[in-house]
Image (cartoon, coloured by chain):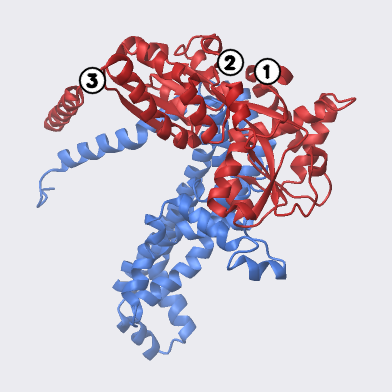
Amino acid sequence: MKRVLPGFGLSLGCTLVYLSLLILLPLSGLAFKSSSLDLSQFWNIASGERALASYRVTFGASLLAAMINAVFGLIVAWVLVRYSFPGKRLLDSLVDLPFALPTAVAGITLATLYAGNGWIGRHLEPIGIKVAFTPLGIVVALTFISLPFVVRTLQPVIEDIEPEIEEAAASLGASRLQTFLRVIFPGIFPALLTGFTLAFSRAIGEYGSVIFIAGNMPLISEITPLLIISKLEQYDVVGATALACVMLVISFVLLLGVNALQWWTANRHHGTERVSL
Amino acid sequence: MSRLIRDFLLGLVVAGAVAASVPAFAESSLLNVSYDVARDFYKDYNPMFQKHWKAKTGEAVELKQSHAGSSKQVRAVADGLEADVVTMNQASDVDFLVEKGLVIKDYAKKFPNNASPYTSTMVFIVRKGNPKALQDWPDLVKPGVQVILPHPKSTGNGRYSYLAAWGFALKQPGGNDKTAQEFVSKLLRNAPLFAAGGRDATTTFMQRKIGDVLISFESEAELIAKEFGKGEFDVVYPSLSILTEFPVAIVEKVVDKRGTRKLAQEYLDYLWSKEGQENAAQNYLRPRDAELLKKFAAQFPAIKTFTVDEVFGGWPKAYPAHFKDGGTFDQIYQSK
């Protein structure tokens, strides 16, 4: 097929070189380094009691944070696109702040806010909710840093949904709930899933903000990146890469799963579209 | 594709040419790679040395400093950061460079005092008026006392705090490794959290008002006073604590390559001069010079201390026994 714009070869070459240099090379270095361990050594490091506990904390908290953001990020994106109100621009740019803020600053600020004498913590602690220096604090930090991913992925998609579609649904007798569930949501869902995935992956790798609010107690609030750092601190680079490899594999499998889900929903959506045409 | 490769190679050549055209360091410059909180010390020390070097040789010398967490720093040196000298806060960090062949094995004998120009010790910072009457280590393991310290596995301060408590328990009548481990285990159970680093522990204790006692370097106490005011806390000296040493060393491979051996030697020697020692005292680090220590006695109360070498047989033994995976720290958390 002749394309309007030339340059497939060049741009593909560029893509391959770029991806290899930036992603594949470091990752294969990681795999290579950890391959100096034999299987039983690798297994011992990867399945230690503290390592297992840290996977639970890291992936559990990241999943929770991504789910919270999927709900509230959707609301934020909806409000920012659909309504106009004074201060909207300001609010819109606030969303990007977690991107720009050095994560350590975010962690220290959150820890100060949610500590027992902090602005928020002082109201939560009397009712028995401890946030700072507990696993809940980890969720708070991860929710903070991963919010923009959901909002920024959803905004353009919501902008593309014309209000006329809602009106048409209403005039054809759909209830408000039906309009949302059957008309709006299927259109947003793939983007929501993408946003969720991005937020989730960002949260898994997060280190800087979490260590300041987590409390870092072994078996309770240690995240896997902290274990990796403490291995590096012992100059145990190989052990650190082993843990990193485990994280990478789990993340990759999860992301692959989400992508498959996305592909499946997109396909199904197209299918119904074709039928309805 | 072939054009892409050609362009790509051209880019590499250009980048290489730019890198190569940056002139090699002039001979009269020196890079000191150091740990995080030594910043203040060397900020004062470097101008002093520049004057000294100028008076001695008539040459001007450019001094560059690099500060960060100490184990990150030595890893950078091992990976090729061209440090002429390293000034660290734990022998295990210099030992790593010995292992990599960058520093000679008996570096500690190349300078006086185990190559550590000044020392410090671990003390207790308590709330104003010491409301829980915490006087010594056994008070810290009592139920209901909250102890703040940085993570013993990932920070130097945390490791010193851990070994200080361990050594104290070991030196009690009937003390052995088992009783010491029980003691430290009780102490750690009183820790509501492990801070990310020394400064984070300070913030948690002073600003967020968490915990009854903070275990910290003596030198850090003065910085806390500067930041939060003297009236906010008391310093308690336990009956026995650990002597923390700050080893310095010449990076052999780099000084040979850059021809800076003499300069590096003089730079480190000068740390033991009257001026260098006085600078340490002014930065709340205990000078090795006995006279100066007397002069600043009000600032440095007498305290019985032990070294890592005396009690633990040196860092090369202490480190794997306590902080490597499966060491005593891990055992404490796996016995649950």
User: Mark 1 and 2 residues: CB-CB less than 8 Å, in contact?
Assistant: yes
- Secondary structure type for disc 1: helix
N-terminal label among 1 and 2 = 2
The amino acid beneath tag 2 is Asn
- Disc 2 crowd, CA 10 A, few/some/many (<14, 14-19, 20+): some
- Measured along the vertical axis of the image, is residue A227 above or below residue B129? above
**The quadrant where residue A81 appears:** bottom left
Q: Secondary structure at mark 3?
A: loop
Comparing labels 3 and 1, the label whose residue is closer to the camera:
1
Q: What SS does tag 2 mark?
A: helix
Residue A261 seen anywhere in this rendered image of the structure: no
| A56 sits left or right of B191 in the view | left
Reading the image, the residue beneath label 1 is: B309
Q: Nearer the viewer, residue B4 or B269?
A: B269
Whole-percent x, y for residue B271 in the image: 47, 22
Measure the C-alpha gap from mark 1 to mark 2. 10 Å
* Image coordinates for residue A59, horizontal then vertical, percent: 57, 49
Q: Which residue is mark 3?
A: B24
Q: Chain of mark 3?
A: B
Instruction: State the separation of the CA atoms marked 3 and 1.
Output: 40 Å
